[in-house]
Image (spheres, rainbow, N blue to C red):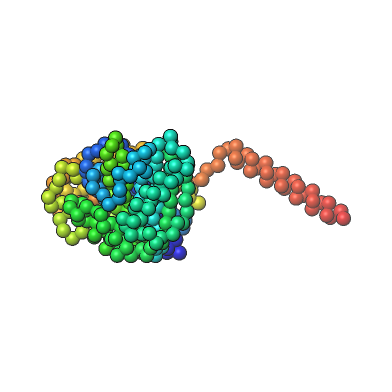
């Protein structure tokens, strides 16, 4: 049961906070190199329990340096658009997945052949040639030719995850990655870590983006009232040093807190509200989030950064439930059904007595 819960939490975190539609898309035609730390806080109603999810994501965008793959080969230079190479945990093991996108002028056969060549380049660079193909697929996604391949499995251990991240940056926010691995791998029923390399082509140039995402959640009562919580960034990062020592112009920290969300539960329509009590240190801006997939969300941004020991956001969570009220038409239908059933029951009973 614990492993299933971890998979649910990780998948929810991956879909809700890593999807390129939720966190700003890395496919934008920008080549500015930057590092962003996203912290996302939101409620999730899992079967049987309510979770307050607190995730931290380190995103290193648009580097010209990445894993040692041969990007001068034909598959990368004839219709190639972008790709994702991801590590996803599944219990005590992990699998690797490739999502590769090409221009649609390529035939299905050519796109599949190119994708296999690209996959082999990555498996060679990471010494994963012994992994078996788990599943494959291809089609059209967002007006691009999409080819998918997944391979497995490897043990979900600190050593193996560190090996996957051997091409990570070592400066700036890159110094925080080892702490995340230490805390979230192999994790437990409520923690875990996923990561992916992205490669995109703009014009004749290639740009790498690395995403490292740590997932954690806490079970709360369904009727939560007055629950105080401190979102401690150093704690989430497993960092015991000053959070920002020597800030860089290309760094920023963004905290997204979903202030209101509603679930249709068996008890009725239930709304959960997060109120921000205090934010430390000063020097931030706060506004409603501009991300369309994050409605009713507050965005706390530190940009530009300055030397700071930590960031702590104090919140209070509450809930309210609206009892189910059936429309008059539904109530009328129920009444008619009850009357009809009563008449039928009376007739059957009367006939049985005659017999």
Q: What residue is shown at x 24% (from left), y 54% (from top)?
A: 168
Q: Nearer the viewer, residue 155 or 55?
A: 155
Whole-percent x and y of residue 346? 77, 49
Q: What residue is shown at x 28% (from left), y 61% (from top)?
A: 162
Q: Can residue 225 be seen by looking at this rendering?
A: no
Q: Residue farthest to the right?
A: 355
Q: Can residue 121 be seen by looking at this rendering?
A: yes
Q: What residue is shown at x 72% (from left), y 44% (from top)?
A: 340
Whole-percent x and y of residue 247? 14, 47
Q: Nearer the viewer, residue 349 or 297?
A: 297
Quarter of the image that includes the C terminus:
bottom right
- Could you tell whether 59 is left or right of 84 in the image? left
Instruction: Locate residue 32: give its quadrant.
Output: top left
Quarter of the image that includes the N terminus:
bottom left
Whole-percent x and y of residue 83? 36, 45
Instruction: Locate residue 123: give its quadrant.
Output: bottom left
Whole-percent x and y of residue 158? 30, 64
Q: Nearer the viewer, residue 157 or 46?
A: 157
């Amino acid at each position: 049961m614990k492993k299933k819960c971890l998979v649910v939490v990780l998948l929810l975190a991956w879909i809700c906070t890593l999807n390129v539609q939720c966190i700003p898309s890395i496919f934008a035609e920008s080549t500015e190199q930057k590092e962003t730390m996203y912290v996302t806080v939101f409620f999730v109603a899992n079967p049987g329990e309510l979770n307050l999810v607190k995730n931290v994501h380190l995103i290193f965008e648009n580097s010209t340096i990445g894993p040692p793959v041969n990007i001068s080969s034909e598959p990368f230079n004839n219709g190639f658009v972008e790709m994702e190479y991801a590590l996803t945990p599944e219990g005590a093991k992990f699998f690797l997945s490739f999502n590769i996108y090409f221009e649609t002028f390529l035939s299905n056969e050519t796109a599949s052949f190119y994708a296999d060549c690209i996959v082999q380049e990555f498996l060679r660079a990471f010494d994963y040639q012994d992994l078996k193909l788990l599943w494959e697929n291809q089609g059209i996604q967002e007006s691009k030719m999409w080819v998918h391949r997944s391979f497995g499995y490897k043990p979900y251990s600190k050593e193996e995850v560190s090996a996957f991240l051997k091409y990570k940056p070592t400066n700036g926010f890159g110094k925080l990655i080892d702490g995340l691995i230490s805390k979230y791998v192999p994790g437990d029923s409520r923690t875990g870590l996923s990561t992916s390399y992205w490669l995109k082509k703009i014009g004749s140039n290639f740009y790498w983006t690395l995403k490292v995402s740590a997932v954690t959640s806490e079970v709360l009562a369904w009727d939560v009232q007055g629950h105080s919580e401190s979102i401690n960034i150093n704690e989430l990062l497993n960092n015991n040093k000053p959070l920002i020592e020597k800030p860089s112009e290309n760094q920023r920290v963004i905290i997204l807190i979903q202030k209101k969300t509603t679930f249709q539960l068996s008890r009725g329509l239930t709304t959960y509200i997060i109120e921000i009590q205090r934010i430390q240190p000063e020097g931030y801006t706060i506004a409603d989030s501009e991300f369309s997939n994050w409605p009713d969300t507050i965005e706390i941004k530190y940009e530009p950064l300055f030397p700071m020991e930590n960031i702590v956001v104090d919140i209070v969570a509450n809930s309210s439930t609206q009892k189910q009220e059936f429309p008059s038409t539904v109530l009328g239908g129920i009444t008619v059904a009850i009357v009809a059933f009563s008449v039928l029951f009376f007739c059957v009973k009367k006939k049985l007595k005659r017999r």
